[in-house]
Amino acid sequence: AAPALSAALPRAHAPAPGHGSAPAAPTPAAPVAARVGPVMGLGGVLAAAVLVLGALLRRWQRPTPQDPWAMCATGGDTGRQPNLPIKIAAQGMGLLKPIFQAEALVQAAALGALTGVDKAAVAEEIEQNKRANKVLIYTYGLSPFSAEAIAMLEGSGYEYTQIELGLEWFLLGGKGSETRVALSKELEGGATSLPKIFIGGKCIGGCAELAALVEGGELDAMMRSAGARRRR
């Protein structure tokens, strides 16, 4: 209805040819809305898909093993192997990276400006957390990928610090949205997905990358090299 009305008004009040000033230039709001609208609409579709996928994947979620005999045999490391369906789904999420990147930038720009978030302060807070923690993980509360990564870290037997950014990306506020974008800059590919895992101050990636380290038997050596402490 809005386009039809705006088109009708100039015809009703247009000056005669050769008289009056030229029509006013269109405001920049229209092209901005044209770009933001589809992205946010697609974000809603992605949000619904993430909720459905999360509900399905949680049916396959396994608890972290707590067998005391396994703990004794491995010196505290139960060697929990990745959950195959969740690992495959985490790898597949990489195909949607360009879409999530676009959505994340729009969300951070809109909510960050609305709440007056200081981008430099957000980036500095991440740096402080990296320096203060040998093993650090940023998560979403409802994400099966975050839950799986936490289970693997629990199974490793090492201490770690968890920071929950929010329940999910589409439920983040201004600071959380800016933090999500800032964390994406820790990886060369710019993935905005969580979890984001740091070992020794370096971002190793997310659930799929952690699963690869566990399966390859490389996680323990990386933890020891970073100076991570075993849980007592």
Image (spheres, rainbow, N blue to C red):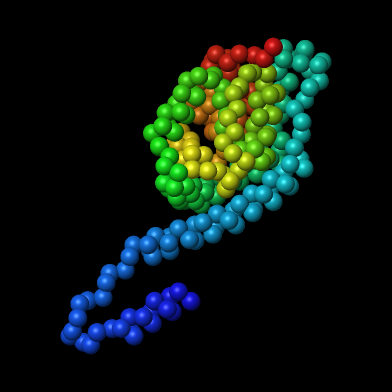
Q: Is residue 158 visible?
A: yes
Q: Answer with the quarter of the image where residue 137 lies.
A: top right
Residue 24, quarter of picture: bottom left
Q: Residue furthest bottom?
A: 16
Rendered view: 107 above or below 31? above
At horizontal 79% and vertical 17% (from top left) the residue drawn is 70
Looking at the rendered structure, the number of numbered marks drawn on it comes to: 0
Instruction: Tell me residue 140's x, y (percent).
Output: 61, 38
- The image position of residue 129, as x and y in percent, is 50, 24
**Residue that appears at 17% across and 85% down:** 18
- Point out residue 7 in the picture as x, y percentages from the top left corner: 38, 79
Residue that appears at 44% across and 47% down: 114
Q: Is residue 225 left or right of residue 30?
A: right
Name the residue: 56% across, 22% down. 135
Q: Is residue 142 above or below residue 161?
A: below
Residue 145 in view, yes or no:
no
- Tell me where residue 5 appears, x and y as whole percent: 42, 78
* Residue in the foreground of this view, choosing between 113 and 142: 113
Judge left or right: residue 52 versus residue 121: right
Quick check: 168 left or right of 25?
right
Indicate whether 208 appears above or below 27.
above
Instruction: Judge whether 66 appears above or below 142 on screen.
Output: above
Find the residue positioned furthest to the left: 18
For the C terminus, give its image quadrant. Answer: top right
